[in-house]
Image (spheres, rainbow, N blue to C red):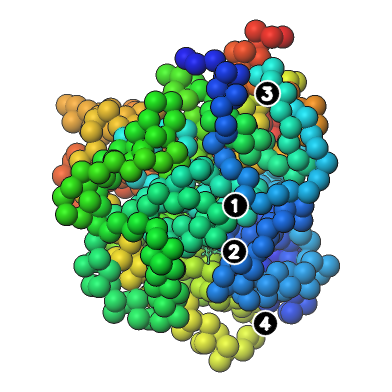
């Protein structure tokens, strides 16, 4: 039997596994987190008295279906939980589980690695008490904790309203939801958003519920900074009408949508193209997720699409893999899945406009603002590197000089902003400054584990 | 730089919204004894009891993690045995000794 390995235990990875099991294979499913379900559908630990149905709201049914699907598969797959894949080299995955290094060889690989928050630096964003928006949701499901007593949800993302509502239901006091995209941009995006009326309606309900609960919602604001001595004390904004406001709070959930985790795809040989709507370099795949020889990508790790698109694209990737093994697949089902993924990704293009990445904000950042939180590299240091005589105009060279993007997070959080800052300083289109390259390990690992990778 | 233990007498950054059932654990964080429940992550314990997790190696600014999901690497702390761990993906354990500042760990050894 061919050795098929799936990385990622979210909707995409679980669905891919189920198709392979139905075809009589026994895939390995590797998942970094201890709890299965991925980022949005993560199962809370048994010891936590979380009312998951209340937390998942209208998605509770889907959550339950995904987890019963996983339960039915567990005996028929080789599930490795709490295992990080930190490298890929010549068809071998390098793993780390509880401090112990290991390897998993594969014949075919499906990567369903999901996404992390996309962040734009802001004065004060490194203060204790500022967390990513996705992190704020994860800590609630994973640890039953709220990120603070009085919270501002700041940025622009459909998850802003969802997270705020989950926090409200969990008893948090919400100082405000501050969305940096004006309502006019949301109206303009309606055509793409109509591609998924149900999801659109859900978003409107989240917002209305918050409004009815008396949570202040501020649209089209420009964030000026997060203030505080040693920890967060307030968020300074200019609201849509040009008024300066300080919103007192002790925690901030901050984010601008999601960014695919593509590090493993790169190591496994995927090629990348610049996507002008997301303003990100995304891995190239065909409609079914093929990204190279024996390499398939699915879910948010391939292109941000949400949980439904993740499931459908996970199924597609598995069908593609089976097709390439010479096993005929049900054409009608494939066509249906392709339409589904296309429709949902179309919707995401609408979301990317309705909840915009703040390109203009990167140009107005003060030189003192920290861009790289790993090594405290400032925006000014990046700009002066670019402006120096014969200064670099390509992000990997800027990274080598300034160390922005070289720290332990491997540019996950400064990368998108670094591209914008360099393009802004060079006055060229962002695609021209290139793409930050990745290396193994994709996350820091103990030295002894890295040593074992040497042949 | 403010002294860590003093800050920890203030209430923490995190608020427990959902009770956790499990054995009570006792950990030492920079010489303070704190209680936790089996299943708590080290980061949750640190931030339920304080507002700072560490000080950055580059310039010493206070930090308290950021992504809460093992991606940003802004929550590394030292354990009594000298190991460095990522607090948000490490489970708290009974009698764990945690140092938010590696220098202090050395000074103590
Ligand atoms: C933080 C966050 C919170 C979200 N909250 C919600 C929500 O509340 N409701 C909602 O409807 N949608 C939510 N979403 C969106 C939705 O969850 C996603 O669209 C969906 O989960 C995507 O599924 P996926 O299978 O592609 O990836 P994910 O569900 O993200 O799963 C990816 C899995 O891969 C694992 N992984 C990644 N890299 C590696 C590696 N190198 N080695 C081993 N394992 C690895 C991860 O640990 C994770 O378990 C959230 C997204 C994020 C990022
Ligand atoms: S908080 Fe980001 S890695 Fe722990």
What percent of the width, then of the height, locates residue A305? 46, 68
Q: Is residue A364 visible?
A: yes
Residue that badge 1 annotates: A140
Same chain? Circles 2 and 3:
no
Q: Which mark is residue B29?
A: 3
Crowding near pointer 3: few (<14 within 10 Å), some, many (20+)? Answer: many
The residue at 64%/86% (across/down) is: A328
Measure the C-alpha gap from mark 2 to mark 3.
Answer: 32 Å
Give the mark count.
4
| Element assignment for label 3 | strand
Chain letter belonging to callout 4 = A
As rendered, which of A155 and B82 lies closer to the eye?
A: A155
Residue that badge 4 annotates: A327
Is residue A311 depicted above or below A242 in this figure? below
As rendered, which of B58 and A186 lies closer to the eye?
A: A186
Crowding near pointer 1: few (<14 within 10 Å), some, many (20+)? Answer: many
Left-right relation of A206 to B104: left
Measure the C-alpha gap from mark 3 to mark 4.
Answer: 57 Å
Left-right relation of A355 to B43: left
Same chain? Circles 1 and 2:
yes
Is residue A250 depicted above or below A209 in this figure? above
Which mark is first along the chain, 2 or 1? Answer: 2
Ligand 1 contact, mark 2 (Cβ < 8 Å): yes
Which image quarter is the C terminus of chain B in? top right
Residue that badge 2 annotates: A55
């Amino acid at each position: 039997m061919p050795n098929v390995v799936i990385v990622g235990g979210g909707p995409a990875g679980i669905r891919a596994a189920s198709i392979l099991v139905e075809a009589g294979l026994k895939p390995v499913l590797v998942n970094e987190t201890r709890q299965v379900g991925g980022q949005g559908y993560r199962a809370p630990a048994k010891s936590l008295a979380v009312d998951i149905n209340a937390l998942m709201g209208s998605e509770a049914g889907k959550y339950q279906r995904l987890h019963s699907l996983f339960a039915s598969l567990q005996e028929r797959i080789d599930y490795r939980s709490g295992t990080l894949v930190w490298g890929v080299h010549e068809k071998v995955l390098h793993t780390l589980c509880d401090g112990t290094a290991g390897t998993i060889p594969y014949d075919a690989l499906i990567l369903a690695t999901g996404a992390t928050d996309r962040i734009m630096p802001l004065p004060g964003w490194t203060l204790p008490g500022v967390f990513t928006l996705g992190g704020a949701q994860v800590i609630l499901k994973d640890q039953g904790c709220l990120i603070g007593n009085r919270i501002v949800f700041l940025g622009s993302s459909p998850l802003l309203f969802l997270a705020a509502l989950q926090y409200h239901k969990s008893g948090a006091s919400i100082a405000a939801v501050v969305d940096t995209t004006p309502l006019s941009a949301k109206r303009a995006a309606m055509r793409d958003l109509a591609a998924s009326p149900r999801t659109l309606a859900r978003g409107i309900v989240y917002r209305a519920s918050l409004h009815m609960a008396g949570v202040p919602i501020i649209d089209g604001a420009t964030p000026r900074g997060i203030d505080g001595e040693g920890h967060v004390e307030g968020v300074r904004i200019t609201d849509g009408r040009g008024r300066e406001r300080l919103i007192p709070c002790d925690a901030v959930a901050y984010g601008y949508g999601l960014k695919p985790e593509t590090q493993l795809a790169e190591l496994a040989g995927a090629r990348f193209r610049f996507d002008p709507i997301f303003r990100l370099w995304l891995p190239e795949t065909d409609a079914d997720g093929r990204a190279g020889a024996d390499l398939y990508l699915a879910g948010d790790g391939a292109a941000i699409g949400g949980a439904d698109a993740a499931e459908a694209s996970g199924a597609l990737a598995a069908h593609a893999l089976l097709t390439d093994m010479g096993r005929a697949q049900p054409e009608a089902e494939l066509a249906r899945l392709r339409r589904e993924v296309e429709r949902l990704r179309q919707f995401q293009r609408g979301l990317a406009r309705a909840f915009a990445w703040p390109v203009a904000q990167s140009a107005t950042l003060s030189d003192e603002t920290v861009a790289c939180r790993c090594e405290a590299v400032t925006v000014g240091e990046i700009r002066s590197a670019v402006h120096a005589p014969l200064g670099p105009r390509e992000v990997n060279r800027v990274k080598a000089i300034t160390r922005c993007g070289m720290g332990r997070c491997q540019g996950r959080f400064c990368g998108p902003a670094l591209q914008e800052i360099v393009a802004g300083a060079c006055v060229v289109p962002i695609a021209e400054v290139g793409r930050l390259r990745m290396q193994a390990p994709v996350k820091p690992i103990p030295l002894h584990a890295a040593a074992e990778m040497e042949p | 730089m403010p002294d860590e233990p003093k800050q920890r007498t203030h209430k923490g950054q995190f608020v427990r919204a959902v009770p956790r059932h499990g054995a009570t654990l006792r950990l030492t964080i920079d010489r303070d004894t704190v209680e936790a429940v089996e299943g708590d992550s080290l980061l949750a314990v640190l931030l339920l009891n304080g507002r700072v997790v560490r000080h950055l190696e580059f310039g010493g600014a206070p930090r308290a993690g950021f992504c809460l999901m093992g991606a940003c690497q802004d929550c590394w702390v030292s354990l009594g045995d000298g190991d460095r761990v990522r607090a948000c993906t490490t489970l708290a354990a009974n009698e764990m000794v945690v140092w938010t500042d590696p220098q202090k760990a050395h000074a103590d050894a």
